[in-house]
Image: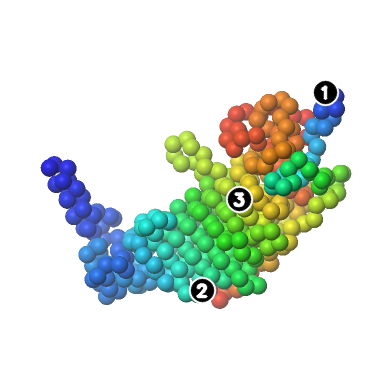
């Protein structure tokens, strides 16, 4: 029970889809994340072209 | 017999202009034999052939009714407070607006409403919106992008108080696509009850919702008027909700949504929490093997990371937020 209580409130990353079920390897410790940023979709520029 | 007569009366009445909004209604039916853009468009017996033909006669407060068919047009709305109504957004009666190239719908005027329409674009934005009070609902919006430039399902460019609800948005697993993109000072918009699927894929960046230069956007369920709450569903995409990093206060809410099968993050927020004011709370993540609820309040005892931000009370069921939560201490 004590162990469980200690485990509560852990910050976890997004639960992954089926193939990674149960393995939350990307844990945040302090302010550090071990999961990379997603790739960025660039902001479109052609508003005026219509 | 009576019912036959009534059916006949109803059918005839529906042909008359008085049935729908009187003289403020215009009708478009490109499948009708007598359809012509030179008709007056005041009834289903003399409809316009194209939506563009109807828009040439449009004025504020008008409603344009559109019957099913394929409309290969780039629609540009000419004035404020117009309403475009299709039959349905999918199935045999779909009103499909799919131009050969370019953007199916451009609306730079406020207070317009679009419903029960289908917008399909290839290598281009599907809908470009600018102006206050625009409503977009019960529509199908598809973007299929195979070029390097970014394409948006809905591009909100300085839209204020827009309502985007009950739509089905499909990114066709293509890359550099965003389902709803809010930019250029869009404020107080609601994104509610929509279904997002296939915006990006494994290794193909794409977001269901991208928030850039915008404030106070509510990404929350749609309340249908009968006490039913329909969540936004963010499914099978690369990232569900992506907050671009900008410096000022933003104040968005991402509450009570549904996430499943997304490839990278469900929600990604790289902003500084001390100034961003972005609230992530009580969303449901349909993945197995992570949920633990020691006090049985329907909220997980874990916090879901969204990079710099957190969903502090992820749900055990998509409607569990209706039950009051038990306060927790020492969350972080």
Specify few, some or many for label 1: CA neighbours under 10 Å numbering under 14, 14-19, or 20 or more: few
Q: CA distance from mark 3 to mark 1?
A: 36 Å
Q: Is residue B207 above or below residue A13?
A: below
Q: Is residue B74 above or below residue B90?
A: below
Disc 1 with disc 2 on a shared chain: no
Residue B151, given in percent of the width and then of the height, sits at 59, 67
Point out which mark residue B135 bears.
none
SS at circle 2: loop
At x 73%, y 32%, the residue is B292
Q: Earlier in the sequence, mark 2 or mark 3?
A: 2
Mark 3 — on which chain does it sit? B
**Residue in front for this viewpoint, B236 or B177:** B236
At x 65%, y 30%, the residue is B298
SS at circle 1: loop
Residue A7, given in percent of the width and then of the height, sits at 82, 32
**Residue in front for this viewpoint, B104 or B185:** B104
At x 82%, y 27%, the residue is A5
Q: CA distance from mark 1 to mark 2?
A: 61 Å
Residue holding disc 3: B235
Q: Is residue B83 left or right of residue B189?
A: left
Specify few, some or many for label 2: CA neighbours under 10 Å numbering under 14, 14-19, or 20 or more: some
**Residue in front for this viewpoint, A38 or B262:** B262
Residue B246, given in percent of the width and then of the height, sits at 73, 59
Q: Is residue A50 left or right of residue A6?
A: left
Q: Residue furthest top?
A: A1
**CB within 8 Å, label 3 to label 1:** no
Mark 2 — on which chain does it sit? B
**CB within 8 Å, label 2 to label 3:** no
Q: CA distance from mark 2 to mark 3?
A: 27 Å
Point out which mark residue B102 bears.
2
At x 53%, y 47%, the residue is B193
Residue holding disc 1: A1
């Amino acid at each position: 029970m004590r162990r469980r209580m200690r485990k509560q409130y852990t910050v976890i990353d997004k639960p992954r889809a089926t193939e990674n079920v149960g393995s939350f390897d990307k844990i945040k410790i302090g302010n550090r994340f071990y999961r990379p940023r997603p790739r960025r979709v660039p902001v479109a520029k052609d508003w005026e072209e219509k | 017999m009576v019912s036959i007569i009534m059916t006949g009366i109803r059918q005839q009445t529906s042909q008359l202009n008085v049935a729908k909004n009187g003289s403020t209604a215009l009708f478009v039916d490109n499948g009708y034999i007598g359809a012509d853009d030179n008709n007056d468009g005041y009834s289903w017996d003399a409809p316009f052939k194209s939506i563009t033909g109807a828009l040439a006669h449009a004025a504020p407060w008008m409603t344009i009714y559109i019957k099913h068919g394929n409309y290969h047009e780039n629609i540009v709305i000419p004035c404020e407070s117009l309403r475009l109504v299709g039959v349905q957004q999918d199935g045999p009666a779909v009103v499909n607006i799919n131009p050969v190239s370019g953007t199916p719908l451009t609306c730079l005027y406020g207070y317009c409403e679009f419903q029960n329409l289908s917008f399909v674009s290839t290598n281009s934005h599907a809908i470009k919106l600018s102006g206050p009070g625009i409503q977009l609902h019960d529509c199908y919006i598809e973007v299929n992008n195979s070029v390097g430039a970014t394409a948006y399902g809905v591009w909100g460019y300085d839209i204020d108080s827009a309502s985007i609800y009950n739509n089905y948005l499909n990114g066709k697993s293509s890359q550099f696509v965003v389902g709803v993109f809010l930019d250029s000072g869009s404020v107080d918009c609601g994104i509610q009850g929509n279904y997002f699927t296939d915006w990006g894929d494994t290794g193909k960046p794409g977001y269901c919702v991208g928030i850039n230069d915008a404030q106070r956007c509510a990404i929350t369920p749609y309340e249908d008027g009968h006490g039913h709450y329909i969540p936004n569903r963010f499914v099978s995409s690369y990232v569900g909700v992506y907050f671009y990093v900008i410096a000022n206060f933003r104040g968005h809410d991402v509450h009570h949504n549904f996430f499943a099968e997304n490839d990278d993050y469900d929600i990604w927020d790289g902003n500084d929490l001390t100034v961003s004011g972005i609230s992530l709370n009580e969303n449901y993540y349909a993945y197995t093997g992570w949920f633990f609820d020691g006090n049985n309040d329907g909220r997980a005892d874990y916090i879901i990371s969204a990079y710099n931000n957190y969903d502090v009370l992820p749900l055990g069921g998509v409607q569990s937020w209706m039950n009051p939560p038990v306060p927790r201490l020492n969350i972080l």
